[in-house]
Image (spheres, grey):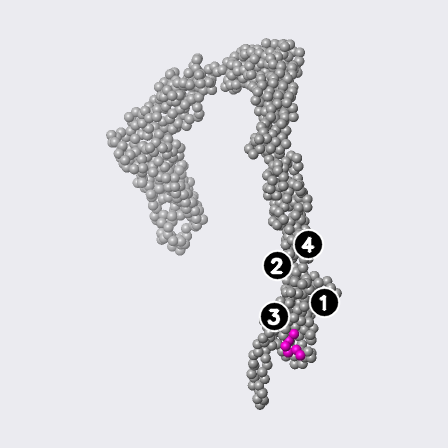
């Protein structure tokens, strides 16, 4: 099959098509034939040999943007098997087949039905095949070919980044690069000049130029001055077809701004200025402004001002306002019209940022002359001193002179001056001032310990113009006199250990004095000589405004005395000296060997024998439990009392029957043996509880006297006789028990509990070495020995 194309319309394309066709024909003129041998089916012995047809390969071209009324002819497919009788059918498949490209299945002609755009799609891949129209069997193998969209100049160059904004320094050299612009063309850059762009400048000459090939914009003039013109609008054109007639073009705008450089020095608009300043102007205040102009901007226009000459250099100063670039003239010293009426200053303004490339345009500074005229005003009185400090003793009488202030009218009129104290509503008015002389006096008795310093403000005004006031601060120091006696620095809690030794320091005290240092320390500590010598403590002056409390004897006992009082005296070093008395309280406490206080409370004596608080609590709980058991037992006993049951059948037998088990001595319900247990405690003879008594018993006082005069044996015999003669007792014997031990023995007790009351020569100091368990015992025997020694 051959592929033929007749799409070449221009002479160049015709030549290319001719070359392609000739080359294709010459190259594919030989057809490769392959023999395919097949077996004859059903006894057929004939072998068919079908030569393989060869495709003539070529590319098809179709012009883009075809606007004709008829479909555009692309090319023709032809098979060697086609005899022109219509038995061959051509089929076209692939990209755009049937929609963009159609084929005549009989002739093989291919047409384009739509206008194509190469910028959207550059080529299409399709497949062609020839089949037998009758059998629909392929006559040739399927072949692939390409239809390329041929470019035409249908796209103008475009500046994708425009418009542009760019800056270039003023006074730049000619040819300084400003910016490079680039235009893009969507046409095929490999085919013809459709995408070949040339740049030109349409607007902006003669200031700027552009390179036709690279698009670089450059300055075209020397020394372009920003102060003359700052902004430029340059229009750049890009044209394809290498700039030839008929080419398409596009343009963009480049906005160029000249940036500032320091090429202009500052200039004062005038060479002479005049300024009026009243003499009442306050020191440090701004009295005027001056400004030099600079055509530059930003930091290139920054400048500083200075006073370089004149007779007012020491009176005035100048600073620069960075925002307004003005010189601010300030007053350094007060003005006085009566002394000097005018000043002359030479002020210079200079740039701070210099560009040495433009130093030939300098100097970058300028100077002007400023004349300052001092104005005369009516001034308030002027005090002789800026402030006053005066002194007065405390307790001085009312009306005591403290000091005098002086003010004068500085004007030539020299008016009289009046004085007064400017009190606020909260001030305590302790002073007054003579309106004519300015003498300050006290109005109250002052106390330095309450207020050691007073600050008052004295005002002065002219008699002719009371509205003009001047003020001065007056400080009054109150001097001290010795009017406060010394006293203890604080309340002292002094403790002495029971095991203290003579001469031992138990505390150190100090004193304070409300008076000043000269009338306070040094302090003297001593005991009151009017009192007898204290046998327990003494006082030692340490000569450093402190004193030590020392013990006079060995050992103290809380059981004997737990608090001691020590009167002391304190005097100061003032003239005359003042003294005061105080009483120190000393508590006796139990201490460890190292002097640490163990306890100072009296309840601690209960545990001094070695029992801890927990042990004491346990003992108390046991006692409470025992008492509860006893009360419960007595209650149960009383609730179970029953009368004796005596057998009525046999009254001769002394057998007593009980309903419960025997309980020993408790089973004596028939008799009251309380009196037999302790005859000394018997109060009265009680009745038998088992029978009703018929005989009146002996009176109480007779019984008591009888019991006290007899011993136990006689008492028992007496009771036995009474029982025998008593007709109301049962006619049988009964057993009674007696638990009385008798009176106290004359030999006395052998217990050691009272041994402390007897004299003994034994040394008990070794008990202190037996450990903490015997510490309290050692202290007790030590106290007893100390008391015997005393």
| 10 Å crowding of disc 1: few (<14), some (14-19), many (20+) | some
- Indicate the position of residue 253 as horizontal and vertical percent values: 67, 46
| Residue on which the image places disc 4 | 247
Which marked residue is nearer to the observer: mark 1 or mark 3? 3
In front of the other: label 2 or label 1?
Answer: 2
What residue is shown with label 3? 24
Tag 2 secondary structure: loop
Q: Decide: few, some or many residues near mark 4? Use Cα within 10 Å; few <14, some 14-19, many ≥20.
A: many
Observer-nearest residue: 104 or 444? 104
Viewport quadrant of the N terminus: bottom right
> How far apart in space, not on screen, are marks 4 and 3 (Cα)?
35 Å
User: What secondary structure characterizes most of the magenta part?
Assistant: loop
Residues in magenta? Answer: 78-83
Residue at image mark 2: 190
Residue at coordinates 64% horizontally, 58% vertically from top-left? 192
Disc number for residue 704: none
Q: Secondary structure at mark 3?
A: helix
């Amino acid at each position: 099959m051959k592929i033929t194309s007749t799409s070449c319309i221009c002479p160049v394309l015709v030549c290319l098509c001719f070359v392609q066709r000739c080359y294709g024909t010459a190259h594919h003129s030989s057809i490769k034939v392959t023999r395919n041998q097949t077996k004859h089916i059903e006894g057929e012995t004939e072998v068919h040999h079908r030569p393989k047809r060869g495709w003539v390969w070529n590319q098809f071209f179709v012009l883009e943007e075809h606007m004709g009324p008829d479909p555009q002819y692309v090319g023709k497919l032809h098979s060697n098997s086609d005899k022109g009788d219509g038995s061959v059918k051509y089929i076209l498949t692939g990209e755009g087949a049937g929609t963009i490209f159609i084929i005549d299945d009989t002739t093989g002609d291919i047409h384009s039905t739509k206008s194509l755009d190469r910028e959207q799609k550059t080529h299409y891949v399709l497949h062609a095949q020839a089949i037998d129209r009758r059998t629909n069997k392929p006559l040739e193998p399927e072949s692939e070919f390409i239809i390329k969209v041929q470019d035409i100049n249908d796209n103008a160059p475009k500046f994708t980044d425009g418009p542009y904004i760019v800056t270039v320094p003023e006074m730049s050299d000619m040819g300084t690069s400003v910016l490079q612009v680039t235009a893009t063309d969507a046409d095929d850059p490999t085919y013809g000049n459709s995408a070949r762009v040339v740049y030109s400048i349409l607007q902006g000459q003669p200031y700027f130029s552009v390179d036709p090939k690279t698009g670089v914009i450059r300055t075209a003039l020397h020394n372009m001055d920003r102060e003359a013109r700052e902004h430029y609008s340059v229009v750049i054109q890009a044209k394809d077809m290498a700039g030839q007639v008929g080419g398409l073009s596009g343009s963009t705008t480049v906005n160029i701004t000249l940036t500032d450089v320091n090429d202009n020095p500052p200039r004062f608009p005038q060479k002479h200025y005049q300024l009026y300043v009243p003499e009442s102007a306050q020191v440090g205040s701004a009295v005027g402004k001056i400004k030099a102009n600079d055509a530059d901007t930003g930091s290139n226009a920054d400048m500083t001002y200075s006073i370089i000459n004149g007779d007012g250099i020491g009176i005035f100063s100048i600073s620069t306002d960075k925002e307004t670039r003005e010189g601010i003239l300030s007053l350094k010293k007060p003005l006085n019209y009566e002394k000097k009426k005018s000043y002359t200053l030479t002020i210079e303004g200079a740039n701070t940022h210099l560009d040495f490339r433009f130093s030939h345009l300098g100097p970058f500074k300028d100077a002007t002359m400023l004349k300052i005229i001092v104005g005369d005003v009516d001034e308030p009185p002027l005090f002789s001193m800026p402030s006053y400090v005066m002194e007065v003793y405390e307790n001085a009488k009312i009306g005591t002179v403290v000091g005098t202030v002086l003010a004068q009218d500085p004007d030539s009129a020299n008016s009289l001056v009046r004085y007064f104290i400017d009190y606020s509503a909260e001030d305590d008015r302790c002073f007054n001032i003579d309106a004519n002389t300015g003498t300050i006096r006290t109005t109250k008795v002052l106390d330095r310990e309450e207020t050691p310093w007073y600050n008052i403000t004295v005002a002065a005004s002219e008699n002719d113009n009371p509205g003009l006031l001047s003020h001065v601060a007056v400080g009054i120091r109150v001097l001290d006199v010795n009017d406060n006696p010394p006293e203890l620095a604080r309340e002292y809690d002094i403790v002495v250990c029971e095991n203290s030794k003579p001469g031992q320091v138990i505390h150190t005290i100090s004193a304070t004095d409300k008076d000043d240092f000269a009338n306070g320390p040094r302090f003297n500590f001593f005991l009151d000589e009017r009192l007898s010598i204290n046998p327990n403590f003494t006082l030692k002056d340490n000569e450093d405004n402190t004193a030590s409390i020392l013990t006079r004897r060995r050992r103290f006992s809380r059981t004997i005395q737990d608090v001691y009082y020590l009167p002391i005296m304190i005097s100061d070093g003032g003239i005359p000296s003042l003294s005061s008395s105080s009483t120190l309280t000393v508590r006796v406490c139990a201490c460890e060997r190292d002097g640490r206080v163990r306890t100072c409370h009296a309840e601690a004596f209960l545990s001094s024998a070695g029992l801890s608080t927990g042990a004491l609590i346990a003992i108390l709980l046991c006692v409470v439990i025992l008492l509860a058991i006893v009360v419960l037992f007595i209650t149960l006993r009383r609730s179970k009392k029953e009368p004796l049951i005596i057998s009525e059948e046999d009254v001769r037998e002394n057998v007593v029957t009980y309903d419960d088990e025997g309980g020993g001595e408790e089973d004596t319900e028939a008799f009251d043996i309380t009196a037999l247990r302790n005859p000394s405690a018997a109060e009265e003879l009680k009745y038998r509880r088992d029978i009703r008594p018929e005989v009146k018993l002996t009176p109480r006082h007779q019984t008591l006297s009888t019991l006290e005069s007899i011993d136990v044996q006689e008492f028992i015999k007496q009771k036995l006789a009474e029982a025998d003669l008593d007709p109301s007792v049962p006619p049988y014997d009964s057993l009674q028990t007696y638990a009385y031990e008798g009176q106290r023995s004359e030999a006395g007790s052998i217990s050691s509990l009272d041994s402390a009351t007897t004299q003994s020569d034994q040394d008990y100091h070794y008990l202190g070495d037996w450990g903490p368990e015997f510490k309290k015992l050692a202290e007790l025997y030590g106290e007893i020995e100390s008391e015997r020694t005393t």
